């Protein structure tokens, strides 16, 4: 384990570096599913900026001498609702735009009035679920314990937020990741099957 590498919470200033790692992750996933092709219009930096601003995604980053070399994304759901788990930097933005806030509220009220309200009773009780969403470490930094450190921080974060269960998805061929999480006490609980048509 390299002691120079620190793990910290990401901030909006990290969006460019995170965007590059996010893109590398998606390109790496293509080896498990060759149908995955990035859309030419995909803007990873913009996506990450939005995710970091809205407070619904927690990102840990691994930093080696100011260079971000990996990331780990965590989300918390209550039922099917993605919860706010970080302070949103957008709240301050809206407060500064007082007149627009009034217009926004009026539009929201009008849209709510136009939309028919149909209440569907829930099928199952809602639970707080932690989701280990995405992670990536640059190849030259793999095997140095970064992923383990990420997992420890993520699970501690989820404990502090009192989740009932933690889950993640992995490609069946990605046995390294599956075996890692099995050693952490995770069990395979669902299999998704696909068929090309």
Image (cartoon, helix red, strand yellow):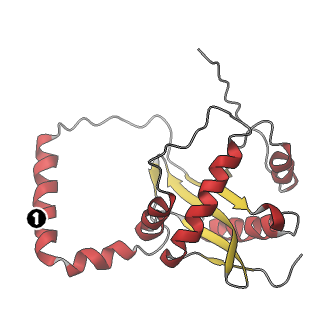
Q: What number of labels is visible?
A: 1
- Pinpoint residue 34: horizontal percent, then vertical percent: 68, 33
On screen, residue 132 above or below 16 = above
- The residue where tag 1 is placed is 103
Image side of residue 47 versus residue 108, left or right: right
Residue 118 found in image quarter: top left
Identify the residue at image location x=83%, y=65%.
140
On screen, residue 165 above or below 15 = above
- Pinpoint residue 71: horizontal percent, then vertical percent: 66, 66
Identify the residue at image location x=65%, y=23%.
194
Farthest top residue in view: 197
Depth order, front residue of 2/160: 2
Quadrant of image for the N terminus: bottom right
Depth order, front residue of 169/16: 16
Identify the residue at image location x=70%, y=34%.
190
On screen, residue 111 above or below 147 = above
Instruction: Characterize the local packing of mark 1: few (<14), some (14-19) or many (20 or more) Cα atoms within 10 angstroms.
Output: few
- Pinpoint residue 125: horizontal percent, then vertical percent: 50, 43
Identify the residue at image location x=55%, y=63%.
19
Image side of residue 40 versus residue 194, left or right: left
């Amino acid at each position: 384990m390299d002691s120079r590498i620190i793990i910290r919470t990401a901030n909006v200033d990290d969006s460019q570096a995170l965007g590059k790692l996010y893109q590398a992750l998606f390109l790496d996933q293509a080896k498990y599913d060759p149908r995955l092709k990035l859309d030419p219009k995909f803007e990873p930096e913009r996506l990450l900026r939005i995710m970091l601003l809205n407070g619904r995604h927690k990102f840990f980053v691994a930093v080696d001498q100011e260079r971000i070399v990996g990331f780990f994304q965590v989300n918390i759901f209550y039922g099917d609702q993605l919860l706010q788990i970080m302070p949103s930097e957008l709240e301050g933005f809206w407060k500064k735009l007082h007149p627009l806030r009034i217009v926004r509220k009026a539009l929201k009220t009008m849209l709510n009035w136009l939309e028919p309200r149909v209440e569907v009773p829930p099928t199952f009780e809602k639970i707080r679920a932690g989701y280990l969403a995405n992670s990536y470490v640059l190849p030259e930094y793999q095997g140095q314990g970064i992923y383990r450190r990420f997992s420890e921080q993520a699970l501690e974060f989820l404990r502090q937020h009192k989740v009932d269960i933690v889950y993640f998805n992995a490609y069946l061929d990605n046995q390294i990741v599956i075996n890692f999480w099995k050693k952490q006490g995770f069990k395979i609980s669902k299999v998704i099957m696909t068929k090309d048509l």
